[in-house]
Image (cartoon, rainbow, N blue to C red):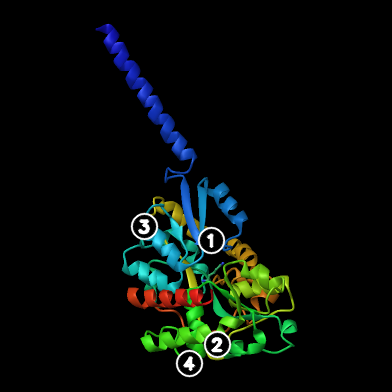
Amino acid sequence: MKQLVRLFLAIVIVSALLLWGISSLNASQGYSGDNTLTVYNWGDYIDPELISQFEEETGISVIYETFDSNEAMMTKIQQGGTSYDVAVPSEYTIDKMREEGLLIPLDHNQIPNLKNIDSRFMDLPFDPGNQYSVPYFWGTVGIVYNPSMIDNRKLTSWNDLWNPAFENEILLIDGAREVMGMGLNSLGYSLNDTNVDHLRAAKEKLDELTPNVKAIVGDEIKMLMANEEAAIGLVWSGDASDIMYENENLDYVVPSEGSNLWFDSMVIPKTAKNVEGAHKFINFMLDPEVSAQNTEWVSYSTPNKAALPLMPEDMTSDERFYPSEELTKKLEVYENLGQSNLAFYNELFLEFKMHRK
Ligand code: N2P
C-alpha cells in the first residue's frame, strides 16, 4: 500500500512539474496574454526601434504582424485565430468593425496622452467621442510623379493619366477603394457612390487605363518610384513623402476632380487578451517624442499636435502633406457603405485586375 501511495505522489509531482514547465514555456514564447502584446498594423507603418523601446519600458514583449488592406485585416480579426490586442484600421473599417461588435470600447483614463491629438482629428463621424479609436496617421490619396520622365508635363487631374503618352508608366497601389475611387472621381462621381451603373462605368473607365498601367503593387511602390521604374504612381500621401525624400525629382498632387481624405486609428479588437497592455501601447504611441520619431520614420502625417514642434520644419510646413483644414474639407472621407456595396467595390476591382492579364 505504501508503495502505491509513493507511486501516486510521484505521478502528482511529475504532472505538476510538467504543467509548470509547459506554462512557463508558453509565456516565454509569447502566448500568455499577460506579458505579451500582439500588434496588427499596416506594412512599413512603425519605427521598429519604438517597439523595442516600448518593450524595455514596460517589460511587455510585442508580437508584431502586418497587413496590406483593411479587408484582409478585418477578415483575420473576424476569424479570431490570433489574439490581436491592437490594430490600425482606416475610418470606414472602424465603423464596420464597431457595427459588427469587433471592437472593445477604450478607457480614456488609461490614455492621458490623448490630449496631444489635434482636436481637428478627434470626434469624427466614423467614431463619435473616440469611443473605439485613437488617431495614428492621416493623409490623402493622390498622384506622385516624375516630371523629368514625362517631358516636364505638370499633372493636375485624374483624367491626365489616360493620356496615351503614358503607356506602361503608371503604378497603382493595391487598394480597392483607392483604384475604384480614381475611376469614380475621374467621372465626377463620389468616392462613396453606390449606384451600380456608376460603379460599372468607373470600372470600364479603369479598363481603358490598362495600357498605361505597368503594375498594381504593395509597399514596394515606394522603391519602384524612387528608382524611376515608372513615371507616375497612385499613392497614399505618406508614400509620396517617403519617395520624394529618396528622389527629389518627384512631385505630389491631389487631383482637381477631388480625392480621398483618410484617417488610420488604433483600436482594441475583441480578440484582445491584454487589454491593459493595449492601452499602454496606444498611450505610448501618443507620447510627443515617440510620435515625432515615428512620424519621421514612417513619413506619413501625424495628428499629434504636440509632436509637430519636435519635427523638422520642412516636413511639417509642407502643404502637400499637411494640407489646411480648408483644403481637406473639399476632400471625401470613405464611408462604411455596408457589406454588399463594399463587396461590389472589391469584385469590380478584382475584375479590373483580371482584365489586365
Ligand atoms: C502604409 C499604408 C498606409 C495606409 N504602408 C493608408 N491608409
Q: First in sequence: mark 2 or mark 3?
A: 3
Disc 3 versus disc 4: distance between alpha carbons?
37 Å
Q: Quadrant of ligand 1?
A: bottom right
Task: Give residue 253's mark.
Answer: none
Crowd tier of the residue under label 2, counting other residues whose Cα lies within 10 Å: few below 14, some 14–19, many 20 or above: few
Q: First in sequence: mark 2 or mark 1?
A: 1
Crowd tier of the residue under label 1, counting other residues whose Cα lies within 10 Å: few below 14, some 14–19, many 20 or above: many
Q: Indicate the secondary structure of the residue bearing disc 1.
A: helix
User: What kind of residue is marked 3?
Assistant: Gln
As displayed, is residue 206 above or below residue 245?
Answer: below
Q: Judge from the rendering whether residue 182 lies leftward or rightward of residue 81; answer left or right.
A: right
Disc 1 target residue: 285
Disc 2 versus disc 1: distance between alpha carbons?
27 Å
Q: Looking at the image, which is closer to me, 201 or 333?
A: 201
Name which quarter of the figure residue 96 lies in: bottom left
Disc 3 target residue: 79
